[in-house]
Image (spheres, grey):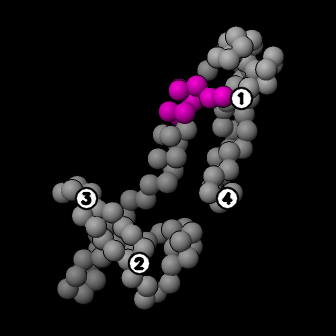
Amino acid sequence: MEKEIKCHLCEGKAVLKYEELKLDKGRIIIKNSPYYKCVECKEEFATSEQMHELSNKINTKFVFQRPIINAGRSLAVTLPADIVQYYKLKKGEKIKLIPESRKEIRISLS
């Protein structure tokens, strides 16, 4: 990643900076997120490469793989403690499983 690029607004010098990015009211924190700040007009922006990298980081950090297990005569999937805590789920609450395709199921809270 280049330390300096041309500003897309004023064509001045934009320098690489890093910040702590807080999402969802500070519940999700991504440290050292890169962006550029123009020395001339003070515009702050991210390149498409930086946005793509951020998107990949979010998609890999917030994906949970869980095994399908036996629960009596049924199959079950457990929920990670982080997900339970984040969504404030309680035993006995109901969720909806919505088939999106043969490879995808969406989960919705009732």
Tell me: residue 29, above or below residue 6: below
Q: Residue at x 62, y 29 (%)?
A: 46
Q: Residue at x 33, y 63 (%)?
A: 106
* Quarter that holds the N terminus: top right
- Residue 14, position as x, y percentages in the image: 73, 18
Alpha carbon separation for disc pair 4 and 3: 29 Å
Q: Are marks 3 and 1 in contact (CB under 8 Å)?
A: no
Over which residues does the magenta segment extend? 45-53
Badge 2: residue crowd in 10 Å (few <14, some 14–19, many ≥20): few
* Quarter that holds the C terminus: bottom left
N-terminal-most mark, 1 or 4:
4
Alpha carbon separation for disc pair 1 and 4: 21 Å
Q: Circle 1 sits in a helix, a strand or a loop, which is it? A: strand
Report the side of 103 relative to 23 (left or right).
left
Alpha carbon separation for disc pair 3 and 2: 17 Å
Q: What residue is disc 4 on?
A: 25
Q: What residue is disc 3 on?
A: 100
> Is 48 or 85 nearer to us in this picture?
48
Which kind of residue does numbered mark 2 sit on? Ser
Q: What residue is disc 2 on?
A: 110
Alpha carbon separation for disc pair 3 and 1: 38 Å
Q: What residue is disc 1 on?
A: 44
Which kind of residue does numbered mark 4 sit on? Lys
Tell me: residue 86, above or below residue 11: below
